[in-house]
Amino acid sequence: MRVAVVGVGQTKFDEHWEKSLRDLSTEAGAIALRDSGIDGKDIQSLYIGNMSAGRFIGQEHLAALAVDQAGLIPIPATRCEAACASSALAFREAYFSILSGEYDIVMAAGAEKMTDLKGTDAIATLMGAGDQEWESAIGLTFAGLYALIARDHMQKYGTTREQMAMVSVNNHRNGVLNPLAQFPAEITVEKVLKSPLISDPLRLLDCSPITDGAAAVILVSEKIAKRFENPIWILGSGQASDTLALHHRKSMTELVATKVAAKKAYEQAGLKPKNIDLAEVHDCFSINEIIAIEDLGFCDKGKGGKFVEDGKIARDGEKPINPTGGLKSIGHPVGATGVRQIADVVKQLRGEYGNLQVKDARFGLALNIGGSGATSVVNIFGRDKPK
Amino acid sequence: MRMPHKSSVPLFWRLKDSKYRLIGSRCTTCKEVFFPKKNLCPVCRRRGSIEDMQFNGNGRIVSYTIVRVPPEGFEKYAPYAVAVIDLEEGARVSGQVVGNITKVRTGKQVRTVFRKIHEDGSDGLINYGLKWEIAE
Ligand SMILES: [Zn+2]
């Protein structure tokens, strides 16, 4: 049994003062349905990723609310949570629900409304994804955790401050052309290095922003996919876990969960890192894109900074990374990011991404990470139907 | 917004062995040491045998950062230094390093001190716990 994605939708990622979480999730779902041509009444089940609506807006029981708002009652609705990797989990559950033979047409979505809270409350809410007793309790933040990782990577491998800045520069250069991006503006290395320190050595322009937004995709069984002109096939899907607290890992310069998830996804797809034509990776902080490049096998451990510096990650480079802008430029509504990445990979593989198009893209990969790497999800997609 | 984890008396009472007395665990089956205390050895699982172990509070900084944009509740302490510390006995922990933040460096020896971590508003708990100071 094979499963394909036949519809994708994303709201603009932004500070949406005028829109609620329910508005955003309905909007993304409607765009995905329109894109697919499928009628809402044919959706058999919904899986939605959301990290922390309970703390961001006081609303739990989100999945039922989403089908309620979308007029899809009484289909089953399930919420998935793994911090910033929540919607990649929703996507996998949707995938498995079709693989199981239970359903043929399922929606996977992700949504987050973050800007109703003031900044320090939003930072504390995000730290709910860290170890409450031993990380959050001492005043650590996610910028702090990734700063600890960044310093260790610099110490061990000589990764430079400039190389990390180049990640942000690359992603903003791509995001300029993305009409759905929160910050579609070019930046320079100098600008990154002069932006305020958030948690040394990370500066403001190393960090993805706080964002509202939603994304949705529609998955169908092989049988249904026959009706579609341009289905994009799921070739491999891997997920893995690691210790919740960063300090409990033997190494802070690799995310073992990413390596394990990637190995599984590559094996299922029958592909090697060199076969991947583009990747949407989790650049919540610039250092994390460098580590992702290494852990996905695009270069050796410790060489990610050089890989970036050599321009290989550009949209027309050897290995386009975040060709649509990444979390840095598009924005990072945490629970929506995983499905947003998948929607972007699908658009690339359809070959209809206009100015953002990576040339001749056949195979694409999406990497979504929760917390400081305690959850990692890798999905690989292909243009042609696998055997 | 008041964070429940900061105003819960039982939570602090429950963690008192590790947070105030530096007690971790050792698995007598595989000899692995853990900080804080655990009730299951993740290496041996049910075959393991966990016992309390007193840590001496000495360690070495392996990475550090200066938190300049703090979460809710930590505003008045920023900027502050946080380090990942290799404990002499062999486990790792994160902790705030007190004193002059410009003196914090990877490789420095540190030892524990008992300090105020955080106050939950004017009527909430005053949370004390472990911090670290440079020992050399
Ligand atoms: Zn053991």
Image (cartoon, helix red, strand yellow):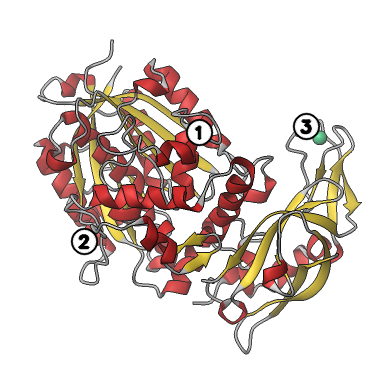
Indicate the position of residue B31 as horizontal and vertical percent values.
Answer: 87, 36
Which quarter of the figure has residue A7? top left
Cβ–Cβ below 8 Å for labels 1 and 2?
Answer: no
The reply to whether dot 3 and dot 1 touch (C-beta < 8 Å) is no
Residue in the picture at 14% in, 42% down: A355
Marks 3 & 2, CB-CB < 8 Å contact:
no
Q: What residue is pinned by disc 2?
A: A23
Residue type at tag 3: Cys
Residues under labels 3 and 1: Cα distance? 28 Å
Judged left or right of residue A227, residue B27 is: right
Helix, strand or loop status at disc 1: helix
Task: Provide the residue designation for mark 1.
Answer: A295
Q: Which residue is drawn at 39% across and 49% down?
A: A166
Q: Can residue A60 be seen in this view?
A: no
Which residue occupies 23% across, 16% down? A385
Please identify, in this view, whether the residue under mark 1 or under mark 2 is nearer the observer: 1
Say which amino acid is labelled 2: Asp
Q: Earlier in the sequence, mark 1 or mark 2?
A: 2
Is label 3 on the same chain as label 1? Answer: no
